[in-house]
Image (tube, rainbow, N blue to C red):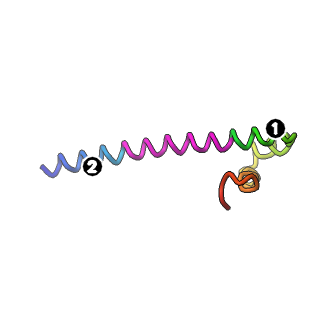
Amino acid sequence: MYDVFAQIRTEGHDEGFDEGFSDGQTSGKNLILALAQHLFDTGRVDDLRRASTDSDYLQQLLVEQGLVQA
């Protein structure tokens, strides 16, 4: 009986993890797209180019635009 409950718990955990991971990916993509759109709209293409290769600068821009908290 314990094995059944353990299996159900494990399956539930795995499903929750997969759903959370998928949601996180979608949220991350939406943040990047919002930032890219803002940078394009304001003529900051060089900033977008730099952010595509510099994760610290990307984070700085996300904070600057109020898309994430520091």
**Depth order, front residue of 46/67:** 67
Circle 2 SS class: helix
Q: Assess whether residue 17 is covered by the magenta stretch.
A: yes
Residue 65 position in % (x across, y down)? 74, 52
Q: Is residue 53 left or right of residue 1?
A: right
Q: Assess whether residue 27 is covered by the magenta stretch.
A: yes
Residue 31 position in % (x across, y down)? 65, 44
How many dots with numbers? 2
Question: Label 1 belongs to which residue?
Answer: 40
Circle 1 SS class: helix
Q: Quadrant of the C terminus?
A: bottom right
First-in-chain label (1 vs 2):
2
Quarter where residue 39 is shown: top right
Residue 33 position in % (x across, y down)? 69, 38
Please tell me the numbered disc located at residue 68: none
**Depth order, front residue of 61/51:** 61
Residues at marks 1 and 2, CA–CA distance in whole angstroms: 46 Å
